Image (cartoon, rainbow, N blue to C red):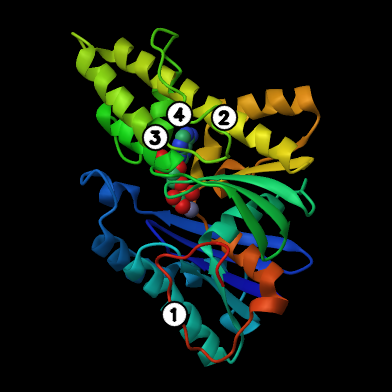
C-alpha cells in the first residue's frame, strides 16, 4: 500500500510517498523561509499562496522522480491541524480532492502526531510505549505515547513554546527568522559570562514557562553598555544553557515519574545540538534509550505525515470526503 503524505500547516510544503511494510520511498520539501524572512515572521496569506503555487508541482515531481503515477497511490494522508487556517486548507483540499477523484481513502493527521511518530522513520525505532519531548515553534510538551492515538500530555507550556522563545530571543539579538538555528550557531562563539533564570525547573509539575526567560534576555541586553558581537554570543550561550537545562531536567523527571525506558525528542528544537548532547550524556548516565529523528525530519516535513497516515490507516481512514480543518487542535482531542 502506497500513501501520499501532504504537510502544509505553516511555512513548509512537504510531500512524501510512504510504502506500508517497506518505509519511506521519498519526500520533497519547499521551505518558505526566504519569503517570510523580511517580515520577521510567517505572513499567513503569503504562506497560503505559496502552498497553492507549489503543492501540485511538488506532488508531480516526487511521483515522476520515483517512476510512479497517481493511480498507484492507495491513500492520501494530510495535516488537518493545528496550524494556519489558510495553509491547512490548501493541503486538506488537495488531499481530499485527490482522494475523491481516485476513490481512495483520505487520512487526516494531527501535525503533532506526525512529529511524535517521526523517529519511526529511522532504522533504529522506539517501540510503544515511550516518552516524548515535543519541542517546536508552537509547542513544548512532554507526552506519554502508549500506542498510536493514545497520548497523554503530562507537561505543557504555560506561555511561549521553546521554539518561540528561541525565535524571540534571536530577534532581540538581531538575528534572522526563524532564529533557533541561528541562535545556536552564535552560541558556539559564546562563553559562560551571564547567568539567566531557569524558569519552573524545581516546580512540582512538568510544565514549562519561557516568557520570563525572554524578558530576562531583554533586560540583560538593555543593561549592556555595548552590545557587540561577543556580548551577543555570550547572551545566546546563556539563553541556550538555561532553556536546555530546563527541558532536560523536566523530561528526565518525567521519565522517572512515568517509569519509561525510552525517550524520543521531536520537533524543530529537537535539531538543537546542545539539547541533543545533554540528553545523550543523561542517557549514558541513566541507561534509558534515546531516539532522535534525523535533522530533516525534526522540522516540518511530509514524510512524518505520510508515516502517521500509514500507521493510522486502519483507524482513521475516511471516504466521505467531507473535511474540517482544525487550526487549534489539542492532541488528545479527536
Ligand atoms: O517543528 P517545526 O519545524 O515547526 C513547528 O511545528 O513549529 O519547529 C520550528 C521551530 C522554530 O521555532 C525554530 O527556531 C526551531 O524550531 N529550531 C531550532 C533549531 N532548528 C529549528 N531551535 C533551536 N535550535 C535549532 N537548531
Ligand atoms: Zn511542526
N-terminal of the pair, mark 1 or mark 4, is 4
Element marked by disc 1: loop
171 relative to 93, above or below: above
- Badge 2 marks a residue whose secondary structure is helix
Give the crowd class for mark 1: few <14, some 14-19, many >=20 residues within 10 Å: few
Task: Give the residue pinned by disc 4.
Answer: 199
Q: Going from the N terminus, do you reach mark 3 or mark 2 first?
A: 3
- Give the mark toward the camera: 1 or 4: 4
Element type at mark 3: helix
Give the quadrant of residue 284. top right
User: Where residue 324 is drawn, which disc sits there?
Assistant: 1
Give the tally of numbered discs. 4
Residue at image coords 51%, 89%: 321
Q: CA distance from mark 1 to mark 4?
A: 37 Å
Q: Which residue is mark 2?
A: 275
Image coordinates for residue 270, horizontal then vertical, percent: 55, 39
Element marked by disc 4 = loop
For marks 2 and 1, give the CA distance: 36 Å
Dot 3, crowdedness within 10 Å: few (<14), some or many (≥20)? many
Asked whether 88 or 185 is in front, the reply is: 88
Is residue 177 shown to the viewer in this render?
yes
Distance Cα–Cα, label 3 vs label 4: 15 Å
Amino acid at each position: 500500500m502506497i500513501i501520499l503524505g501532504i504537510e502544509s500547516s505553516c511555512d513548509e510544503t512537504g510531500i512524501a510517498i510512504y510504502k506500508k511494510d517497506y518505509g519511506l520511498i521519498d519526500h520533497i520539501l519547499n521551505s518558505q523561509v526566504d519569503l517570510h524572512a523580511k517580515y520577521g515572521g510567517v505572513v499567513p496569506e503569503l504562506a497560503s499562496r505559496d502552498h497553492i503555487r507549489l503543492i501540485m508541482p511538488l506532488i508531480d515531481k516526487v511521483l515522476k522522480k520515483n517512476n510512479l503515477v497517481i493511480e498507484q497511490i492507495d491513500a492520501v494522508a494530510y495535516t488537518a491541524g493545528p496550524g494556519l487556517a489558510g495553509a491547512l486548507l490548501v493541503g486538506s483540499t488537495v488531499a481530499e480532492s485527490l482522494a475523491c477523484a481516485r476513490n481512495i481513502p483520505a487520512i487526516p493527521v494531527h501535525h503533532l502526531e506526525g512529529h511524535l511518530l517521526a523517529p519511526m522513520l529511522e532504522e533504529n525505532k522506539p517501540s510503544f510505549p515511550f516518552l516524548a519531548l515535543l519541542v517546536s515553534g508552537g509547542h513544548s510538551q512532554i507526552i506519554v505515547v502508549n500506542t498510536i492515538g493514545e497520548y497523554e500530555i503530562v507537561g505543557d507550556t504555560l506561555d511561549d513554546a521553546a521554539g518561540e522563545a528561541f525565535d524571540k530571543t534571536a530577534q532581540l539579538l538581531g538575528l534572522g527568522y526563524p532564529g533557533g538555528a541561528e541562535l545556536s550557531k552564535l552560541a558556539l562563539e559564546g562563553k559562560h559570562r551571564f547567568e539567566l533564570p531557569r524558569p519552573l525547573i524545581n516546580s512540582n509539575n512538568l510544565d514549562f514557562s519561557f516568557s520570563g526567560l525572554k524578558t530576562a534576555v531583554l533586560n540583560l541586553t538593555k543593561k549592556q553598555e555595548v552590545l557587540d558581537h561577543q556580548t551577543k554570543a555570550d547572551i545566546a550561550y546563556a539563553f541556550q544553557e538555561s532553556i536546555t537545562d530546563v527541558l532536560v531536567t523536566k523530561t528526565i523527571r518525567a521519565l522517572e515519574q512515568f517509569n519509561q525506558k525510552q525517550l524520543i525528542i521531536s520537533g524543530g528544537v529537537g535539531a538543537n545540538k546542545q539539547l541533543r548532547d545533554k540528553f545523550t550524556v543523561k542517557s549514558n548516565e541513566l541507561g534509558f534509550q534515546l531516539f532522535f529523528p534525523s535533522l530533516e525530519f525534526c522540522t516540518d516535513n511530509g514524510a512524518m505525515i505520510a508515516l502517521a497516515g500509514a500507521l493510522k490507516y486502519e483507524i482513521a481512514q475516511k471516504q466521505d470526503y467531507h473535511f474540517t480543518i482544525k487550526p487549534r487542535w489539542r492532541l488528545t482531542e479527536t
